[in-house]
Image (cartoon, rainbow, N blue to C red):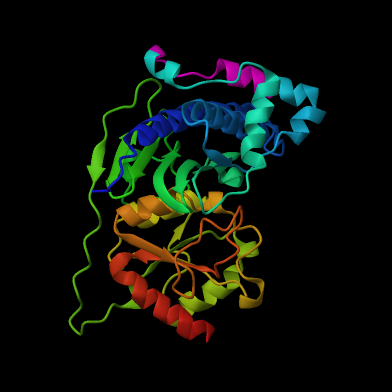
Amino acid sequence: MGSVSYAQEQHLASLAVQRAAILTKNVMRSVKHIAKTDSTPVTVADFVAQALLISALHRAFPSDGFIGEETADVLREDATLRQQVWELVGATELENAADEALLAKPSSSEEMMHHIDLGGRGVGTRNGRTWVMDPIDGTATFIRGGQYAVALALLEDGKEVVGVVACPNLLHPDLARIEDTPVDVEGYGIMLSTALGEGVILRPVGKGSLLPGQHVSARRPAPPTANGLIDPTSWNFVDSTMGEKYHLQNVKRFASTVGALFPGTDVWSTHVRLIVLGLGARQGGNVQVRIPPRAEGNDPEDYIWDYAGSQLILSELGGKATDLDGREIDFGAGRRLSRNWGLVAAPGWLHFEVLHRVQEFVG
């Protein structure tokens, strides 16, 4: 059990993520009637979700900081887009009035843009509390109706202490095998939430109060093989064939070196991949590896909102994530993961073996 209770933060964060997940799923459903080349629905949903998340949290915790992907600059320049976002902010609410009353909304479009900018201009710190959010992680698959996530984390002194991730397209019965398809067409998917040291709660995403959830046990260590070694050919690499900009060729070569299929599970959203690592039942264990050139550090596209929240969930489920030097992921370095090189994420019982082999591979 954690020494400090974050029950209030976890509950409010779960309600806020649920409201944002409903909004994004409703927008995604509207995409069926819009050209897939039109990015406007994703843009609108990103802005609305970030505004709703920050508005709810800022009223409850006015001294906390925020980090989000979006700034409101384009909304100030585009009155039509601003009006679209503002109308959706006003129209989105939970069906349970008491729970909705716990979640604030901006009172004007100007306040809405201010709240968005609280996240878009947030820089992070190693001191105090900062909420980190990814309103839509996996926009490329979101627009096609595939898997995506709404992610929220609370950092305290640069460490994750609360994590909530909704996967609005993830079918509850299919958790043993998670892919970009099939999806939850009728419902709103699932949500996982945790506070440091308190375990993970898994529940369906509803439209009103939080639905009853179940505690998910940490994964047990795999039974040792006859010779005490783990066969790497059975590792299940969780990645995406769409991820060439993440130096995917290096991971492909590494998987080939150990004799494993790549990718074993093909999912684009980073947060959904980490949920796969935590929940997916595979005999050899799920692994994710990032191998950028050392001279470049982590890829410029690696931001803390791509990992914060789901990484805490992975840890609470018995998983482990470090960089290629074996260091913890540093969420206190600012908006980017600038103090880490690459990534190795795996079940705790498997992490050392994967890390050791990756280090041998990169020399």
Query: Residue 94 in magenta?
Result: yes
Q: Tell me: residue 282, above or below residue 151.
A: below
Q: Main secondary structure of the magenta part?
A: helix
- What residue is rendered at 44% in x and 18% in y? 100
Near-viewer residue (158 or 180) = 158
Could you tell me which residue is drawn at 43 percent across and 20 percent down?
102
Residue 361 coordinates in the image, percent (x, y): 49, 83
Q: Residue furthest right?
A: 77
For this orientation, the residue located farthest to the top is 97
Find residue 313 and report its horizontal and vertical position in percent. Answer: 36, 50
Span highlighted in magenta in the image = 84-97
The image shows residue 341 at horizontal and vertical percentages of 55, 70
Please name the residue shown 51% across and 56% down the image. Answer: 331
- Residue 259 is at least partly visible in this image: no
Q: Position of residue 16 (x, y in %)?
A: 46, 29
In the image, residue 347 sits, relative to residue 14, either above or below, namely below
Q: Quadrant of residue 10?
A: top left
| Residue visible at 53% across and 82% down in the picture | 362
Q: Is residue 314 left or right of residue 47?
A: left
Which of 251 and 201 lies nearest the eye of the viewer? Answer: 201
When the figure is inspected, residue 125 is found, relative to residue 243, above or below; the finding is above
Q: Quadrant of residue 278?
A: bottom left
